[in-house]
Amino acid sequence: MPPPQLTDEQRRAALEKAAEARRVRAEVKELLKTDSLSLSEVFERAETDELVAGTKTYAILVSMPGVGKVKAKRIMEEYGIAESRRIRGLGTRQRAVLLELFP
């Protein structure tokens, strides 16, 4: 099935929307790295901000101070969190475990 045909205006709007999403997600990850934002604040922000809610959990964990790719992957495997899971898709127990690990 071919991709939908978009007008130049629709394509431009989609590109702007995607750029905004990348900017917001990069900002959240940078705030986490610098310890200016806590994981609980990310969860709170995800309730009202669709762009934050759509961020992959793995990307958030890797952005936490002291957590690299290997440790993030181990944490997700240990607690049954799929690598493709987004913040909005985390279950109550999964959120609780992550908040316990990163107060």
Image (tube, rainbow, N blue to C red):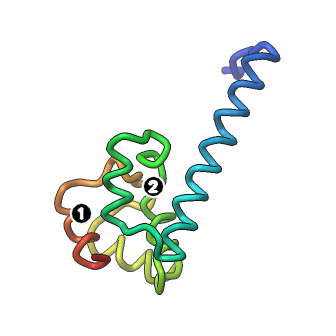
Say which residue label 1 marks. 94
Element assignment for label 2: loop
Q: Quadrant of residue 3?
A: top right
Residue 75 percent across, percent down from the top left: 35, 77
Q: Quadrant of the N terminus?
A: top right
Residue 64 percent across, percent down from the top left: 46, 75
Residue 84: mark in rendering: 2
- Residue at 28% from the left image edge and 70% from the top image edge: 98
Pick the front one: 62 or 41: 41
Dot 1 alpha-carbon crowd within 10 angstroms: few under 14, some 14 to 19, many 20 or more: some
Pick the front one: 27 or 77: 27
- Residue at 46% from the left image edge and 49% from the top image edge: 52
Q: Quadrant of the C terminus?
A: bottom left
Please report contact status of discs 1 and 2: CB closer than 8 Å, yes or no: no
From the viewer's perspective, is 41 left or right of 54? Answer: left
Three-letter residue code for mark 2: Ser
Pick the front one: 78 or 50: 50
Label 1 vs 2, first from the N-terminus: 2
- Residue at 66% from the left image edge and 38% from the top image edge: 18
- Residue at 73% from the left image edge and 33% from the top image edge: 15
Residue 32 percent across, percent down from the top left: 48, 70
Three-letter residue code for mark 1: Gln
Residue 85 percent across, percent down from the top left: 40, 54
Pick the front one: 11 or 52: 52
Element assignment for label 1: helix
